[in-house]
Amino acid sequence: MKFLEENIVSLHAKAATPVEAIVQAGSLLQKQGYVSGAYVDAMLNSYRKNGPYFVLAPQIALPHARPEDGVFEASVSMVQLAEPVSFGNSANDPVRLVFALGASNSEEHLAVLKKLMNLLSDRKRVESLIAASSYKDIETLIRKGGEEG
């Protein structure tokens, strides 16, 4: 499982729309060969069809698609947005952190989600992710999140 490794984390990213933010998060996974381009397209299609259902908590979006849409390896990327973006979810907008999730089966899906929820379960840790200025900051938070989970 590839989880928020340096090559799949983007800090201070600029995106004007939810589509741009989703593409950035998905492209991080695609560039590393963890998902296909079709998977990124499927994430976008899911957003267009179903709306911002994946804006799961204040400031946090978790776009994803089905494993058969092109997941090669379980992975989670993160895009930290320099400026918040409204996804259309009145309860949890605006979004500052976009985590693209790829899992090739339900066991992987649950494992990836558990790891991510351990990291995001503490509001102070979420605020630290939003404020992180370097990957080293992210790495420290991941270690702390993993120890508690």
Image (cartoon, rainbow, N blue to C red):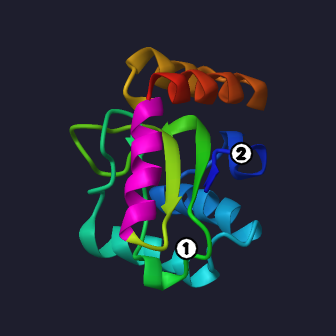
What is the secondary structure assignment of the residue under circle 1?
helix
- 108 vs 14: above or below: below
- 119 vs 61: above or below: above
Cα separation, mark 1 vs mark 2, equals: 19 Å
Residue 10 lies in the magenta-colored region: no
Q: Is residue 127 visible?
A: yes
Q: Quadrant of the C terminus?
A: top left
Identify the residue position indicated by label 1 in the image. Answer: 40
Tell me what residue is drawn at x 63 percent, y 59 percent: 24
Q: Quadrant of the N terminus?
A: bottom right
Give whichever of 45, 139 is nearer the camera.
139
Q: Earlier in the sequence, mark 1 or mark 2?
A: 2
Three-letter residue code for mark 2: Glu
Q: Position of residue 68 (x, y in %)?
A: 45, 84
Left or right side of 111 for 6: right
Residue, far left: 91
Q: Position of residue 93 (x, y in %)?
A: 33, 39
Tell me what residue is drawn at x 51 percent, y 49 percent: 99
Residues shaded magenta:
106-119
Q: In which quadrant of the rendered view does residue 60 lie?
A: top left
Tell me what residue is drawn at x 66 percent, y 63 percent: 29
Give whichever of 97, 33 is nearer the camera.
33
Q: Is residue 85 visible?
A: no
What is the secondary structure assignment of the residue under circle 2?
loop
Q: Position of residue 141 (x, y in %)?
A: 60, 23
Residue 115 lies in the magenta-colored region: yes
Tell me what residue is drawn at x 56 percent, y 35 percent: 83
Contact between labelled residues 2 and 1, with CB atoms less than 8 Å apart: no
> How many marks overall?
2
Identify the residue position indicated by label 2 in the image. Answer: 5
Left or right side of 27 for 111: left
SS majority, magenta? helix
